[in-house]
Image (cartoon, rainbow, N blue to C red):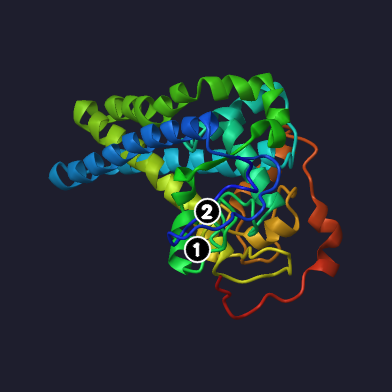
Amino acid sequence: MSVADAEFAPDGSPSIRPQLPPGVIVGGPAVQAKLRETYLLLGILYAGTVAALIWAVVQGIGWIELSVFAGMFALTTFGIGAGMHRLLVHRSFRCGPVMRVFFCAIAQMAVQGSILKWVGNHRRHHLYADDAGDPHSPHYDGFGAPYVSALKGMLHAHGGWAFDQATTDNEHYAKDILADPIAMFFVRTRWFWYGMSGVFIPGAIGYALGGVHAMIGCVLFSGLFRCYALILVSSLTGSVCHSYGYRRYEVEDASTNELVTTIITFGEGLHNNHHRFPRDAYISHAWYEFDLNGLIILGMEKLGLVHDVFHASSRHLADAAPEPQTTPTAG
């Protein structure tokens, strides 16, 4: 059965799904593989989060666990924002093989699925933002049907989309990643990097600084719980930043800038700016818009660690930047 002919019945009555764009797979082995990995990965993180909260209440956590949590959260947040998003998805800058290995490693250590799948999903998101074909819009489900309930839309965008019966064809959206031996090495070995991020690195630091007790606390709180917390924080850009905030630019989707999300994602919450200039490495367009990921990239450019940093907005900012709306927008 084709995508266009597939039946969709959110209220129990038969209907026809909207036409989905190319590169969207509905059902079949690819979706089953996606769901198996989603359930396994999130099942581990859910169990680790519960155990971490119990440990924190019963045993307590100290400066070691908090410090390792903060350090690993910062590293992997930069991995998602600079490595996964701006380098691999949008090619906002270039770097040599050593730095590419570094960025792929910290991107994969964010524990948000494989580099390949993340890149394909995000490119599809930009191409069909807040329309049929967007994998994680709060306004449309994975089959292209509009949400009537704002709550259901937000839940879908904030993580529910990972459990739906549709997935991205990476041959269509991420051919460059499939052809990249460095990126594909990290795709094939992703579970090793998940383990390094969630268990082995936090555990080793905890043991070195505080013995077995700190090691257990770091594995649970600074490792597994931190990985799940980062997923929740990163998902704000797809849910909150397509529903609430201010719009500096009039674009064809519902993207917004939301300043709390911006702070805790190191700049990724400047989503309206990003959708207007998707290839830009630095997306702050006002003094109060804090883009830490972009600042670090610019600093690395000065040090010669990255090059060919993309700056489209600097040429267009004067003409393309009206005063932002003062009233929040809601989807």
Q: In the displayed structure, would residue 138 be above or below residue 101?
A: below
Q: Identify the residue at horizontal 49%, vertical 52% (top origin).
A: 235
Q: Nearer the viewer, residue 45 or 138?
A: 138
Q: Position of residue 215 (x, y in %)?
A: 26, 29
**Total numbered circles:** 2
Instruction: Please state the horizontal and vertical placement of residue 145, each as a whole percent of the image.
Output: 57, 59
Q: Is residue 16 visible?
A: yes
- The residue carrying mark 1 is 260
Q: Which quarter of the figure has residue 196?
A: top left
List the residue tagged with mark 2.
8
Badge 1 element: helix
Looking at this view, is 118 or 144 the one in front? Answer: 144
In the depicted view, which residue is nearer to us: 148 or 260?
Answer: 148
Residue drawn where x is 73% and y is 51% of the image: 278
Query: Which quarter of the rendering shows the C terminus?
Result: bottom right
Residue type (three-letter) at the residue carrying disc 2: Phe
Q: Quadrant of residue 15?
A: bottom right
